[in-house]
Image (cartoon, rainbow, N blue to C red):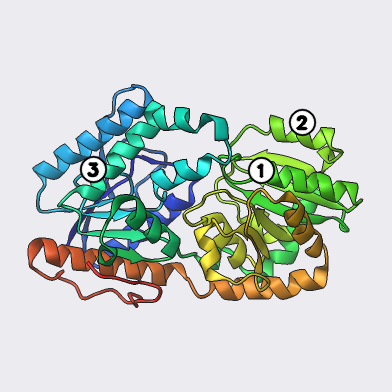
Amino acid sequence: MRVAIARYRYSPHGGGERYLDAMAERLRETGADLRILSSSWERAEMSGSTWVPLRVPNRPAPVRLFLFARAVRQWARAHPDWLLFSWERLPGTEVYRAGDGCHAEWLARKRSLRPHAAMLDRMRPLHRAHLLLERKMFSSEKLLAVIANSSRGKEEIVRHYGVAGEKIVVIHNGVDLSRFPASEKDQARAALRGRFGIPEEETVFLFVGSGFARKGMGALTNAAIALARRRKRFRILVVGKGDPRPYRERAEAGGAGGAFLFPGPVSGAEDFYLGSDAFVFPTIYEPFSNACLEALAAGLPVITTEANGAAEIFRDGDAGFLLADPFDAATLADRMEDLLDGRLRSRMGAAARAAAEQVPLEKKVGEVLRVLSLAWERKTGVPPASPSPAGGERGETTGSC
């Protein structure tokens, strides 16, 4: 089997890239030929993969999207005996992993953030580019299979673009459990508190994500203000790329300025996960948050919203709490206050780790490889030379190629 993975840009800070690394390694283990088509690759080496750099001139972002799509299309035409597996919205791809969700759905949900700018948002060149590429990709006859990382993601694609449900396979994201050993939690907790000067009696909530507005920093700031007015003792570590000023200023005006710490983006965040007490992620739209999955693996109770695909792998009140309304800061504050109780955190933390153990990375990668194998057979009429990889159980997988 020959597989070309298209990813516009690789960054070592992204959860999607770690997932791509695992996918590439497993493909090589099965004996498959592998190419990674990308405009840039921010790492020292390729770990045995072959990077195919695709030149994309320095143009405005919407133009670069089309130029990258054209470059991939040209490469695919010159290499028709390769299966094109895209992680981006690329017309002509044969297998698409919808890891970034459905852009048409995101624009619909974004109205809640910018109700007076909804029409303007839809007319912005970058959004129009994403929508056009998305529409052309889903209508292409070359598309053999779509991998959605949540059932709600599958529903969005069917609803917005009329893709046949049987063509969409649901495979939840997986997590490398070995990155979060329980034996290191006490040491990580002490180190984290020492690093930031956090007293033992203060509960540490962790937020990890870039794109603060979409991922609920507004509601989290309001919840922190509510907790501060209740004279509760806590800290919130915000790890990720974004402008902290509006949230810091609002928190300071509301009397909660001292609660927030903004370390910025980090490469991996294992020490933060293992050293924190709970995870909070009140996202407005999230196909499936790897950050929430990693928090579960670290044994952290998770507060997130029903708009997050990761909500499909645990129940409200079990490994954490699920919010129906991402803007309901009062309920978010109540759930955070609940988790100031160490006994509840301990019980939920054990349930969190158990939930993560149901979606190990090896199993999920195996399920994706099964989809690729079926697509390869459909494309070529020939089964892959090597047998289907271990760990390719159906699991949550639905539909077929």
First in residue order: circle 3 vs circle 1: 3
Q: Place residue 181 in its image quadrant.
A: bottom right
Spatial distance from mark 3 to mark 1, Cα to Cα? Answer: 33 Å
Mark 1 lies on residue:
217
Kindly identify the amino acid type of the residue bearing the numbered disc 2.
Answer: Glu
Element type at marker 2? helix
| Residue located farthest toward the left when viewing the structure as drawn | 381
- Does 127 sit above or below residue 334? above
Q: Residue 249 carries which label?
A: 2
191 left or right of 353?
right
Mark seen at residue 136:
3
Q: Relative to residue 172, is residue 339 drawn left or right?
A: right
Q: Which amino acid does label 3 sit on?
A: Lys
Identify residue type, mark 1: Met
Q: Kindly tell me whether residue 224 is visible in this rendering.
A: yes
| Among the 4 quarters of the image, the one containing residue 219 | top right
